[in-house]
Amino acid sequence: MMTCHRATMKAVEESRKSGEDLLSYHDTIHRGHDEAKLHAIVATMGAMDAQKSQKPS
């Protein structure tokens, strides 16, 4: 489960590192995946933020 989430977050981070902005990343998601996948990514980001709040590093 977490492996899947980490892979998603890594893909987002690598997309940012390569200089793509968030809009073009979202455009890629819309082209390659269905709406449910996008919602899953947003939900994952929210869960990651919640975990950061509970356990500050």
Image: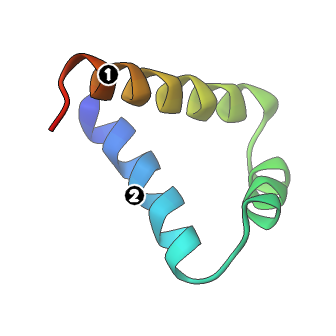
Residues 29 and 46: in front is 46
Q: State the SS at label 2.
A: helix
Residues 25 and 56: in front is 56
Question: Quick check: 10 left or right of 11?
Answer: left
**Which image quadrant is residue 25 in?**
bottom right
What residue is shown with label 2? 10
Q: Is residue 56 above or below residue 17?
A: above
Q: Is the Cβ of the residue at disc 2 closer than 8 Å to that at disc 1? A: no
Residue at 53%, 58% (x, y): give it. Answer: 12
Residue 8 position within the rendered picture, expressed as x and y whole percent measured from the top left: 45, 47
Residues 53 and 16: in front is 53
Q: CA distance from mark 2 to mark 1?
A: 20 Å
What residue is shown with label 1? 53
Q: Residues within 10 Å of mark 2 (few under 14, many from 20)?
A: few
Question: Quick check: 11 left or right of 31?
Answer: left
Residue at 35%, 38% (x, y): give it. Answer: 4
**Which image quadrant is residue 43 in?**
top right
Residue at 51%, 24% (x, y): give it. Answer: 46
Q: How many marks?
A: 2
Q: Residues within 10 Å of mark 1 (few under 14, many from 20)?
A: few
Quadrant where the image shows the N terminus: top left
Quadrant where the image shows the C terminus: top left
